[in-house]
Amino acid sequence: MLETKIASVKMKNPLMLASGILGLTKESLEKFKDAGAVVTKSIGKKERKGYKNPVFYELSCGILNAIGLANPGIDEYIKEIKGARINLIGSIFGKNEEEFLYVAEKFKPYVKAFELNMSCPHAKKLGMEYSTRKIRETVELIKQVGKPVFVKLGVENILRRAEKAIEGGADGIVAINSIKAMAICIDVAKPVLGNKIGGYSGEAIKPIGIRCVYEIAANFDIPVIGVGGITNEKDVIEYMMAGAHAVQIGTAIYYEGEGIFKKIAKKLKRWLEENGYNSIKDIIGLALKN
Amino acid sequence: MFICRISKILKHNATHKTLFLDLKMRAQPGQFVMVWIPGIDEIPMSLSHFGNEIAITVEKVGEATEALHNMKKGDKLGIRGPYGNGFKIVGKKALFVAGGVGIAPLLPLIKEYEGEKCVILGARNKNLLLFEDEIKKFANLYITTDDGSAGYRGFATDLAKKILMREKFDVVYTCGPEPMMKKVLDLCIKSKIPLQASLERYMKCGVGICDSCAIDGYHVCKDGPVFNESILMKLSDFGKWKRNEAGRKISIS
């Protein structure tokens, strides 16, 4: 009932772990065995220490983060994830096609698909800055590696950037990334995050995510993976009715732990049964028709 | 996050200070807080004191701790927490093995523990011994220094071995350099005594979602920082590997 498939990636349910939450070690990834698929941390060609602390700040309806793509580099990372018994999707960032390709080729034996992070909201000269004109050729190049390619985009200029990814042959669009944001501590008159600017995620951004998924689904014929502020089964249904084929959950792990996947899957199944649907696929894009 | 002020500073020696903060907090001995030094950094620190005020005991080892050392009474800090599991009080007779600033999270435990208490306080030299007088009020104190400038000459683990050979304890609590704690674990396994050790790792979020402090599937910030002997025995990284800011494994030297 919950089974779904995007490109060649089969999933037992449409719930994926979003990139950036845990995902550094094999043991951490394997904690998400109840998810349909698990996306790794965004990995680059070389080791990157990320930004100075604080990189995490809790707000009333979400989290502000500026981890800054900290990762050990793909060569070290594949040692960490070797043998992970999980439906894995490798998230990649890079400053040019060459870096994306290097990581994709190393990732290939361990993952079912690639997610190209072209939208990290707080990385200077990386991701966010990944220019719209380079998206198409980068996707084309990574497609040649021989695995499905999903492209993760942020809110800014999303339709134009989605179009470029589709022209390059993307198998799916992941929308949205966290939203560029900031918090200032008024007691000390200073920005809280070490990088000053970070990405805002969690419940507050859900309506923005819904809008983006809806617009992409309405304009293009491509599977969309919805992400942003999902905390329960109703959020999943809303994203799917907006046109998402699957969804990703990140920030909610902070509030509920890895058990959230099992819990949402169960409630999702019950909701479908109670509302007379035979499959999760039946609700995809329902709101687009009205 | 709570913003609070430094209410009192205790200077122990050139590299160690205890900062008292005007923040009321209930915690378990062994729990930690994330300390934001505005505009500089945010680091995890064990609470060496809590209640109507909290205190952190800071060893000067890098930029953040140096900034804390340079702060004055009245200066502001941001605090998140308390985080982590803390020590569990078990049995009626406990041995505490502290190396250097590792005494900090053990201090409130020594005060709260009801029963017979024996503390081994180890440091490189006499000047680096912390909280001797305070510990004496609550427990039998044994001092070890690497150079013999005070107490027993040698490592805290050397003395622990001797004491464990002649006396039976219900539990051992330890905090200090990881190679030292690894030795304490080996001693406890040999003597079949339960152990609780407080670990330190580089931390970012402090709440179990960033994976920076991952150790064999556990997270020091959330599952720890205190681990018992049955978990410690399974941790292949314990005493050998930690992770840098990028998450890459680096050797513990």
Image (cartoon, rainbow, N blue to C red):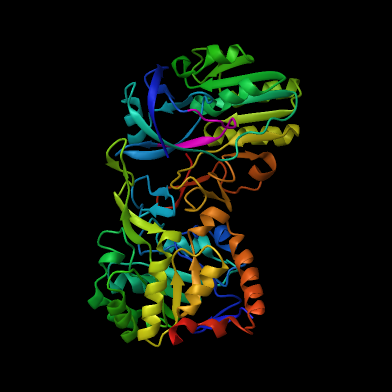
Q: Residue at x 31, y 58 (%)?
A: A122
Location of residue A226 (image quadrant):
bottom left
The location of residue A216, given as percent across then percent down, is 37, 80
- Taking depth in this image into account, of B65 and B193 the one nearest to the observer is B65
Region in magenta: B24-35
The location of residue B40, given as percent across then percent down, is 31, 38
- Image quarter (top left, top right, bottom left or bottom right) of the N terminus of chain B: top left
Query: B129 above or below B59?
Result: above
Q: Is residue B4 visible?
A: yes
- The magenta stretch spans residue B26: yes
The location of residue A81, given as percent across then percent down, is 52, 63
Q: Residue at x 50, y 73 (%)?
A: A238
Q: Residue at x 51, y 68 (%)?
A: A235
- The magenta stretch spans residue A62: no
Considering the whole magenta stretch, tell me its main secondary structure: loop
Q: Is residue A111 visible?
A: no
Q: Residue at x 42, y 83 (%)?
A: A171
Location of residue B127 (image quadrant):
top left
Residue at the extreme front: A290
Query: B49 above or below A21?
Result: above
